Image: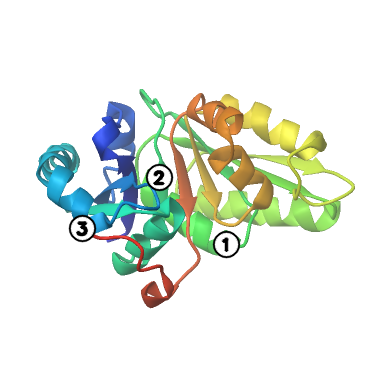
């Protein structure tokens, strides 16, 4: 079964919304509780000081995902680098995607951005498994400077989802350049469209999207206002390449 990683700042009390728990019902889940340490603080020292409290909180969070045969486990990491830790644990657990949590009630429609380094087929496979036979609609979004190719790609993607019984619509934004900057019409269109949906699915390594979803505080606040974001990872990255600067 597909697995999704759910990173949480466990010592700061970050939790998951009921809507996110329900959205992830068709997949297995690993909850990653992490805490970013000052450079001078050794991870082992933090583990001794906070490990028991963090583990108890993680066990409770993982229990929230255990339902109907779904597997849910958890990891704990004290780290100096959040992104490297998420990347390493996602690789170790073979997670297809990881989540940026946000407030969510009922998820009736997903916004799916077909951009970034992840192949469209891989994103669509994930969406099909996530939606399953539930009545969750999908809006596919593509920004491109090649209108004909973009329109064809969206038509094929809509057809793929429709064959699986998923209500799919599409939005194409044609610009002078690809979606590679945190400005301009493509980004504005993405931001406005995403805000009208209950949750977002994106491929990893889309520069604009990463700034929008993972960047500085204003962008992060914007992301949190539109609900959970599921980031689909490329296939088979080597876990051994991750940093050893954390403890899990």
Along the line of sight, the residue nearer the viewer: 163 or 117: 117
User: Residue 107: image x %, image y %?
Assistant: 40, 29
Outermost residue, right side: 176
Q: Is residue 169 above or below residue 195?
A: below
User: Which residue is identified by label 2?
Assistant: 99
User: Counting other residues with Cα less than 10 Å from the Cα at mark 2, is it few (<14), some (14-19), or many (20 or more)?
Assistant: some
Tell me the residue that label 1 is attached to: 118
CA distance separating discs 3 and 1? 35 Å
User: Which callout, 3 or 1, points to the residue nearer the camera?
Assistant: 3
Name the residue: 84% across, 55% down.
146
- Which label lies toward us, 1 or 2? 2
SS of the residue at dot 1? loop
In percent of width and height, residue 161 lies at: 52, 50
How many angstroms separate mark 1 from mark 2 (CA)? 16 Å
Residue plotted at (43% across, 60% down)? 84
Residue position for label 3: 44
């Amino acid at each position: 079964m597909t697995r999704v990683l759910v990173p949480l700042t466990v010592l700061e009390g970050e939790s998951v919304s009921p809507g996110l728990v329900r959205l992830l019902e068709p997949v297995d889940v690993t909850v990653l509780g992490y805490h970013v340490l000052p450079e001078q603080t050794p991870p082992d020292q933090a583990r001794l000081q906070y490990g028991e409290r963090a583990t108890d909180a993680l066990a409770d969070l993982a229990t929230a995902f255990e339902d109907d045969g779904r597997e849910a486990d958890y990891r704990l990491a004290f780290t100096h680098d959040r992104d490297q830790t998420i990347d390493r644990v996602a690789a170790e657990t073979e997670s297809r995607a990881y989540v940026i949590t946000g407030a969510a009630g009922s998820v009736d429609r997903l916004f799916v951005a077909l951009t970034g380094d992840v192949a469209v087929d891989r994103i669509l496979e994930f969406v099909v498994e996530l939606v399953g036979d539930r009545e969750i609609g999908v809006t596919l979004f593509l920004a491109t400077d090649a209108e004909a190719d973009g329109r064809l790609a969206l038509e094929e993607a809509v057809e793929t989802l429709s064959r699986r019984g998923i209500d799919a619509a599409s939005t194409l934004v044609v610009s002078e350049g690809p979606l590679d900057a945190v400005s301009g019409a493509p980004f504005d269109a993405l931001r406005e469209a995403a805000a009208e949906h209950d949750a977002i699915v994106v491929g990893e390594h889309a520069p604009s999207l990463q700034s929008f979803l993972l960047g500085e505080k204003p962008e992060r606040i914007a992301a949190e206002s539109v609900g959970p974001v599921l980031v689909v990872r490329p296939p088979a990255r080597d876990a051994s390449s991750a940093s050893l600067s954390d403890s899990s």
